[in-house]
Each structure stands twice: as structure tokens, then as C-alpha cells.
Image (cartoon, helix red, strand yellow):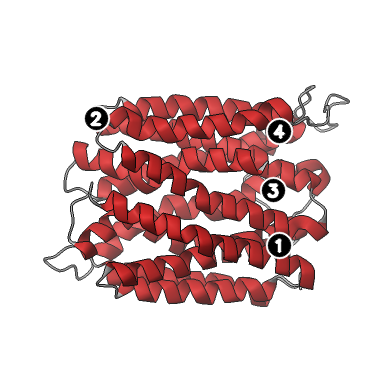
Amino acid sequence: MMVATFGSSMALIVPMAFSLALRVDELAPGREEVLGYLIGIGSVVSLLANPLVGTVSDRTRSRFGRRRPYLLAGSLVGTVGTAVMAWSATVPILGLGWVLTTVGWGTALGAISNVQADRLPRSQRGRVSGLTGVTTQTAPVLGVLLAGAVSSNQVLLFALPCVAGTALVLPYLLGVRETDSRGPAPADRLTVGRLLRSYGFDPRAHRDFAWNWLGRFLFFLGLSMTTTFATFFYAQRLDVDIPGVAGFLAVTAACGVLTALAGGLGGGFLSDRLGRRRVFVFLAGGVFASGAVVSAFADSYVLLLTGSLLASLSIAAFAAVDQAIVLDVLPHRDTQAGRYMAVVGFSQKIPSAVGPLVAPLVISLNASSEGGNYTLLYLTAGALGLVGATLIALRVRSVR
């Protein structure tokens, strides 16, 4: 499961964090906002697709189980999308490829998350979520290294991370058996109305689920506002061209492996061991805000690296522990896990769509002649992350 998560994350995140920025710089030089629009559009389409896939997955009856068919289909669609991006000659074609990529690999990751919701006992949710979070954080390291090594080759820039990711998904598809889900069909029919209702939930009936959703939304909104523009941010602060950023990002990502391991594994295992989750979420929010402040005022690579390492530590810890909270408060786990995991995904997908669209507006406020106002961007992101974590710590009552 961890290997498949690593592969899917690599194939999805590397284009968003690095490859797309290089391609946009070639097709629309000097127009940073194009990157935000493309990623935002892809996130919106993926956002709309996920609940449909989750609901249908819950009802799937096959000898391969409820989740594996969607892992396979998502991987295939994501690979096709990557090929379209690799050979794109215009921004619209690049955008089409990105939409296919994010829907495909997002479906694959969703299938893996649904398996966790189906199978994990409460006592193991923190540690497994920690391993998953570390995997998601560290997967782009290898991907950026691969892409950076061939950044001058348009096709290989996209193809290598995708091929490597697909190769890592195959062992799970071929070697892990899922329970045969063939049997009586659900008593209630799958209607258009039921599909539309799968996009939401009653926050009054599931208060802890609702508060956790809101806190995640704010935290990931802050994160998405900075992640998308990291390449341009480094280029401005280090006074280098866009292709020259690859080496710095690769070193930063490689160093971030250690802090992500510490945050994800430490937070996940300790939250299981101590039986407490909310305090770790709050601490993660504080560390994230601290890293954002350091990055906001960084004028050297050492400070940029410090801010990034604080961020990777906190993101991994937050992702691990809050994912365990998600599984603790998930409504109707036995019959509708796919649907509600997709709704949880909204708390990450909506920020992924909104963040890249809002960030250019923040960057443009009081921008100097040297470039965008990244100081304001990072301070805003840090504040959002801290507020989100605080909401979870104070308002989710059924989890200690």
C-alpha cells in the first residue's frame, strides 16, 4: 500500500511542483498566473469527479473488490494525461493533459485511501497515516531529482516520474488481494439525486467531522498558496532563472525527507501510543506558521531551506495525525467510506483549486519592481495554517 501511494504521489505531485512550471515558462514566458489557472482548473475537475468515483466504488461488485478496479483505471488515465502534457505545444493542450493527469492519479490515490478506511483498526490509524503522509511528502523528492536531471528534454521531464510511479503501483495491483465484493446489490438505487447528495453532508449530524473538515480546509489552503509558486519564489529570492531552480529545489526536497520522516512517523506513532491526537495537530500548525514566517523574510538559501524544513516537518505531522482523526470520525464507515473519504478530499482539493487562483492576487499586492510580494503570500499562508490547526484542536470533541 505504501509503495503504491509513493508511486501515485510522485506521478501526481511532480508536475504540479516542478514540471508544469517549466513548461508554462516555455509556452507563456513571464506569465506566472497561467500556472495557477491550469492547476486550479485541474483541481476543480478532480474535485467534481472524486465523489462520483467514491460513491460508485462503494457500490462496486467485482471479484477484484471495490477499490482495485479504480486504482487501475486511475493509473491508466493519469498516464495518458502525462503523455498529453509531454507532447503539448500550446497552453490549452497542456491544460487538457493536466486535467487528465490530476483526475487519473487522484482517483488512484483515492482508491488507496478508501482501502485504509475499510481496513484499519483505530489503534493503527496514526502510524499508518504517518507512513502514508511521509510517503506523500517524500515521493516528489525522487520525482524532482529525475525531472531535474532531464529538464532540458520536454518529453522525459514528464515521462520519467510517471513511468517510475506506474512501476511502483503495479506490485499492489498484481500482488495484493482484496475481498471479493460480489454479492447482493445495495437495497437503495443509485439515482442522480443520490449522486448529487454525495457531494455534501449534514454538519449538524456529524459535528466533529464538520469541524475537522473546516480545519483541514484552512490548513491546506495555506499550504497550496505556497506550494504552487515555490519555483518562482526561489527564482526571485535567489536571483536565478527558472531552470536553475531545479538544483535548489532538489536539495531542499532531499533534506526535507528527514524532517518529514520525523514529523509523520513521530506524530503518527506518538498519537497512537498516547491516545491523543488534537495536541499534535495544534503543534503542527504552530510549526507550519513559524516556517512560513522564516520563508517570508528569507534572503538567502540557508533561510529558504530552514523555512522549508520547518514546513515539511509540520505538514507531515499534520497529515499523519489529522488523517487518523478523519478515520476516527468518519460517518458510515462500513457502507459509505468511499463517499465520505471523497468529501474529506474536498478539504484538500478545494484549497488546491482556490489557492493557485488566490495566490497571484496576493502576490500582486504592493509588488515591487523586483517581482511579486511573496512575503505577504507566506505570512497569509502561515496564518491560515495556524487557524485551521487551532480549530481542530479546540472543536473536535470525540477525539482526545
Q: How far apart are marks 1 and 4 (CA)?
A: 22 Å
Q: Which mark is residue 369?
A: none
Q: Which mark is residue 67?
A: 4
Q: Which amino acid does label 4 sit on?
A: Arg
Q: Are marks 2 and 1 in contact (CB under 8 Å)?
A: no
Q: Distance between the residues labelled 3 and 4?
A: 14 Å
Question: Which residue was labeled with disc 3?
Answer: 340
Q: In the structure shown, which secondary structural element does the residue marked by tag 4 occupy?
A: loop
Q: Which amino acid does label 3 sit on?
A: Tyr
Q: Earlier in the sequence, mark 4 or mark 2?
A: 4
Q: Are marks 3 and 1 in contact (CB under 8 Å)?
A: no
Q: Position of residue 219 (x, y in %)?
A: 51, 65
Q: What residue type is labelled 1?
A: Ile
Question: Which residue was labeled with disc 2?
Answer: 90
Question: Which residue was labeled with disc 1?
Answer: 325
Above or below for 276 versus 138: below
Q: Which amino acid does label 2 sit on?
A: Thr
Q: Which of marks 2 and 1 is nearer the N terminus?
A: 2
Q: Where is residue 237 in the image (x, y as percent from the top left)?
A: 23, 65
Q: Position of residue 180 (x, y in %)?
A: 83, 27
Seen at 63% across and 49% down, the residue is 343
Q: How far apart are marks 2 and 1 (CA)?
A: 43 Å
